[in-house]
Amino acid sequence: MFEDLKEFAKENNVPIIKDEGLEVLLSEINANSYKSVLEIGCAIGYSSIVMAKTYGVDITTIERNSEMYNLAISNISKYNLEDKIEVVFTDALEYVPKRMYDLIFIDAAKAQNIKFFERFEPFLNDGGSIIVDNLDFHGLTEEDPSKLSKNLRSLTRKIREFIEYLKGRDDYNTIFTHKGDGMSISKKK
């Protein structure tokens, strides 16, 4: 199931969550009986579709790229999930949610992780979690910065700063995993 979406993503170089990362996400939903998800970064709708099909959660997902937005709408329709997944076409930093969520999943511009976390955490229900993907960034966050291009050096520095930011948040219990492409799971105390 969903192999068509994975194949499309691979053929078209669309970044989607890795299988191990998806298992972490689904496990968090299942273990906590979460019912609502806010996803920052929709792409073709893959992770939203899997979450909605697997656990029936209601999802609001944000996408700013018109081509990705249209593909997500089409894929969600193909899986008959229009009643479970709302795709919002906007820049996430301009979006103001209209409700609270059990889980916030951040999988968008990595350099903006702190901004995304701070913007959306007020919309997290008590006992909810914020999961952020791609903290290993294909292994580059562990690389010697001098071996990276200027752009990658800046991006990996911002990812490392975000990791330190999470470690300093005493209002959340955060665990880090190297599953998928590296993730943080921050549970609101």
Image: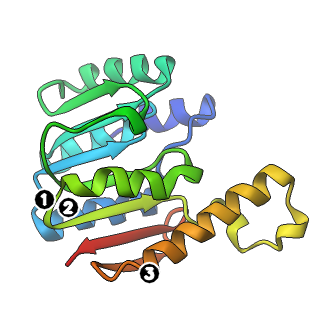
Front residue of this view, candidates 153 and 183: 153
Residue 67: x and y, percent? 50, 17
Which of discs 2 and 3 lies nearer the camera? The answer is 3
Front residue of this view, candidates 10 and 179: 179
Residue drawn at point x = 47 percent, y = 59 percent:
114
Q: CA distance from mark 2 to mark 3?
A: 25 Å
Does the residue at mark 2 contact the one at mark 1 (Cβ under 8 Å)?
Answer: yes
The quarter of the picture where residue 58 lies is top left
Q: Residues within 10 Å of mark 1 (few under 14, many from 20)?
A: many
Would you name the residue on which mark 2 appears?
29
Task: Name the N-terminal-most of marks 3 and 1.
Answer: 1
Residue drawn at point x = 33 percent, y = 83 percent:
170
Q: Is residue 61 left or right of residue 52?
A: right
Q: Amino acid at mark 3?
A: Gly
Which quadrant holds the C terminus?
Answer: bottom left
Front residue of this view, candidates 133 and 5: 133
Q: Is residue 51 left or right of residue 18?
A: left
Q: CA distance from mark 3 to mark 1?
A: 26 Å
- For numbered disc 1, what is the local secondary structure? loop
Q: Residues within 10 Å of mark 3 (few under 14, many from 20)?
A: few
Q: Amino acid at mark 2?
A: Ile
Name the disc covering residue 168, or none: 3
Q: How is the image coloured?
A: rainbow
Q: Is residue 14 left or right of residue 86?
A: right
Task: Name the N-terminal-most of marks 2 and 3.
Answer: 2
Task: Name the N-terminal-most of marks 2 and 1.
Answer: 2
Would you name the residue on which mark 1 appears?
34
